[in-house]
Image: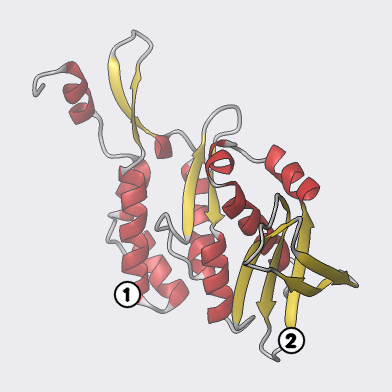
């Protein structure tokens, strides 16, 4: 309803601090800073545009201390310095906070903060662009697959598509290095589930379990890449 208290409450709330900083066109604004960091004004414009979308999608409905309906933004619940720190980390890595390659996640509570989560797709793109590797991949390992590990490296991994693969027992990730050598890592199910137990939320793990296994294996692989 156009005259509802909730609409009035939202209209009465000023733009959040981070959005104001993103729209600041001064010489020391975020856009200018990222342009200077990357040397790419087009990247900086995309970066700021995607960040604005994340901020504008972070409005939530709530109530004030008197129980009246209000709108609040998650980015107003965390220190602005932590948000800026995440933005500049993303810019240095050359990843866009577009909800695909990287995310800005606001954790509210006893320790409110903004955290940059670089998705495994963003990690792969950055590694290929920086010449760290030529290609990256990951696949679940099932009980009927053939896998051999020598000195921590996967020396053999075979899947017969004509036969049932059975239950998932682990995950393997690999990368092709610039010299053509393959670098790989294998995580068993016990290790994957241990990491899952320490995740911030289990919702995505429940819905996309195997994909999260792959993501975890790729992240572990990148720790040994250089």
- Measure the C-alpha gap from mark 2 to mark 1: 35 Å
Relative vertical location of residue 200 with respect to residue 86 in this rendering, above or below = above
- Residue 135, how many percent across, how many down? 59, 79
Quick check: can you spot residue 21?
A: no
* Residue under label 1: 42
- Residue 71, how many percent across, how many down? 30, 27
Which residue is the extreme one toward the bottom? Answer: 179
Q: Locate the N terminus by quadrant.
A: top left
Quick check: can you spot residue 53?
A: yes
Residue located at (68% from left, 68% from top): 160
Res 142 label:
none
Residue located at (70% from left, 49% from top): 167
Observer-nearest residue: 153 or 101?
153
Residue located at (49% from left, 44% from top): 105
Disc nearer the start of the sequence (2/1):
1
Left or right, 203 with respect to 159, comes to left
* Residue under label 2: 181
Within 10 Å of disc 1 (Cα), the crowding (few <14, some 14-19, many 20+) is: few
Residue located at (60% from left, 33% from top): 111
Which residue is the extreme one toward the front? Answer: 162
- Residue 65, how many percent across, how many down? 38, 11
- Residue 22, how many percent across, how many down? 33, 54
Left or right, 66 with respect to 155, comes to left
Left or right, 195 with respect to 23, comes to right
Q: Locate the C terminus by quadrant.
A: bottom right
Query: Residue 133 sits in which quadrant?
Result: bottom right
Label 1 residue SS: helix
Left or right, 210 with respect to 1, comes to right
Which residue is the extreme one toward the left? Answer: 2
Within 10 Å of disc 2 (Cα), the crowding (few <14, some 14-19, many 20+) is: few
């Amino acid at each position: 309803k156009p005259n509802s208290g909730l609409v009035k409450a939202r209209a009465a709330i000023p733009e959040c601090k981070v959005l104001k900083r993103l729209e600041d066109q001064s010489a020391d604004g975020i856009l200018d800073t990222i342009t200077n960091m990357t040397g790419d004004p087009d990247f900086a414009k995309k970066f700021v545009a995607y960040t604005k979308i994340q901020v504008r999608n972070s409005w939530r409905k709530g109530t004030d201390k008197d129980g009246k309906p209000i709108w609040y933004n998650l980015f107003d619940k965390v220190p602005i310095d932590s948000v800026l720190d995440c933005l500049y980390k993303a810019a240095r890595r050359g990843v866009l906070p577009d909800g695909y390659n990287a995310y800005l996640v606001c954790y509210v509570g006893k320790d409110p903060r903004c955290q940059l989560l670089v998705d495994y797709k963003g990690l792969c793109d950055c590694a290929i662009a920086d010449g760290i590797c030529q290609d990256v991949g990951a696949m679940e390992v099932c009980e009927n697959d053939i896998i051999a590990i020598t000195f921590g490296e996967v020396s053999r991994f075979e899947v017969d598509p004509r036969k049932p693969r059975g239950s998932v027992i682990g995950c393997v990730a690999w990368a092709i290095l610039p010299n053509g050598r393959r670098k790989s890592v294998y995580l068993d199910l016990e290790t994957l589930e241990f990491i899952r137990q320490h995740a911030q939320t289990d919702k995505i793990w429940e819905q996309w379990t195997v994909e999260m296994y792959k993501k975890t294996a790729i992240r572990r692989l990148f720790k040994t890449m250089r």
